[in-house]
Image: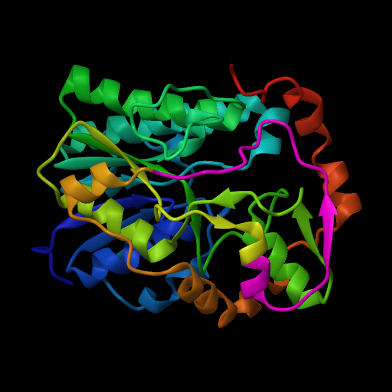
């Protein structure tokens, strides 16, 4: 163990994107301190580093982080992924989302400020834009449609407030549709990949929302992690970027790549866009970042590790209808396009 190595703190570092960022940072010669409560993350995601003294994992909640926290001592970077996701649970328990995603972020900001870090990078969400014009630029108006989106937006605003008031060097990246290996396999109905992969394993029909022509700006997880590390290492401060592949893919195309299988169509949900599409010209120009993994290759990588999703919940039309009742109840009328 070399104390001369630079230190990076990754909150949520046992999770989907965070664990890939840990891989990249360790590969670049960092000593990485991970804080994760393992609610969505898994120690198995860090298995490649379990005997590596350059990885330190502390299993605890970010809401327990204090200024002068020992895990943050001498850290050069803090990359903040920790938080809770999913739309429907945020509608049902908004206070919990505000507590974790806003107040939890404030606690991490205070620890980073006390440590005098060189860069704090916040994992923001493109959901802050609501039903956005596409391709979506960073100057698009903010229109958070549900509590998850609001909580992530408020966390981002808190980070930039710490930059403005306390001089904390902050950048943020607004993630569009990340996908890839190690994505969460438990919890609420949500991300299409987890739903479809379990259905494929079980030999059940894919539950396609609407007619499947809706498109999403899917970006493979290693490309996401690379963008965050680039934002940490850049000399740029006080900036936020949209992050996607810049090439939206349809749900029908995903079904095609996953292989032959039956499809059943379920009703569209209010407040969901027909297309997400990040304008990535700013992040490409300013960080020199470009996506490396094409959609077909990314899906192939996932299929090669499909057994990972065997423990995921199996969804069908009936269980999805039950799980999304709150969505339909509270979001009706909240998703109309503005004239």
Q: Which of 60 and 243 is in front in this view?
A: 243
Q: Can residue 183 be seen in this view?
A: yes
Give the residue at x 37% y 65%: 222
Could you tell me residue 289's position as x and y percent? 23, 56
Give the residue at x 36% y 24%: 157
Query: Which region shows up in magenta?
Result: 254-278
Where is residue 38, by image quadrant? Answer: bottom right
> Which residue is at the far front?
339
Could you tell me residue 158's position as x and y percent? 35, 24
Q: Which of 92 and 195 is in front in this view?
A: 195
Give the residue at x 35% y 36%: 108
Q: How is the image coloured?
A: rainbow
> Which residue is at the far right?
318
Majority secondary structure of the magenta segment?
loop
Where is residue 325, by image quadrant? Answer: top right
Where is residue 5, by image quadrant? Answer: bottom left
Could you tell me residue 153's position as x and y percent? 44, 28
- 272 part of magenta stretch: yes
Could you tell me residue 168's position as x and y percent? 19, 30
């Amino acid at each position: 163990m070399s104390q001369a190595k630079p230190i990076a703190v990754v909150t949520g570092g046992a999770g989907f994107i965070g664990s890939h960022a840990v891989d990249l940072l360790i590969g670049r010669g960092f000593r990485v301190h991970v804080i994760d409560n393992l609610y969505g993350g898994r120690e198995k995601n860090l298995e490649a580093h379990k005997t590596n003294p350059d990885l330190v994992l502390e299993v605890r909640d970010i809401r327990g982080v204090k200024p002068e926290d020992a895990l943050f001592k001498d850290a050069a970077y803090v990359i903040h992924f920790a938080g809770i996701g999913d739309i429907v649970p945020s509608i049902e328990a908004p206070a919990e989302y505000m507590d974790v995603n806003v107040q939890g972020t404030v606690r991490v900001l205070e620890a980073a400020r006390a440590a005098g870090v060189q860069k704090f990078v916040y994992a923001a969400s493109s959901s802050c834009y609501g039903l956005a014009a596409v391709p979506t630029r960073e100057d698009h108006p903010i229109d958070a449609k549900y509590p998850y989106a609001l909580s992530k937006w408020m966390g981002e605003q808190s980070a930039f407030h710490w930059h403005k008031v306390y001089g904390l060097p902050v950048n943020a990246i607004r993630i569009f549709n990340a996908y890839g290996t190690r994505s969460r396999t438990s919890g609420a109905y949500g991300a299409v990949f987890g739903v479809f992969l379990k259905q494929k394993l079980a030999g059940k029909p894919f539950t396609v929302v609407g007619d499947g022509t809706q498109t999403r700006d899917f970006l493979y997880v290693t490309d996401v992690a690379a963008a965050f590390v680039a934002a940490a290492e850049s000399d740029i401060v006080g900036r936020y970027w949209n992050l996607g592949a810049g090439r939206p893919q349809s749900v029908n195309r995903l079904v095609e790549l996953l292989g032959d299988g039956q499809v059943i169509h379920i009703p569209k949900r209010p407040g969901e866009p027909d297309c997400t599409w990040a304008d990535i010209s700013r992040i490409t120009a300013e960080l020199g970042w470009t996506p490396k993994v094409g959609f077909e290759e990314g899906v192939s990588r996932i299929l090669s590790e499909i057994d990972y999703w065997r423990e995921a919940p199996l969804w069908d039309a009936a269980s999805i209808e039950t799980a999304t009742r709150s969505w339909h109840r509270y979001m009706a009328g909240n998703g109309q396009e503005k004239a």
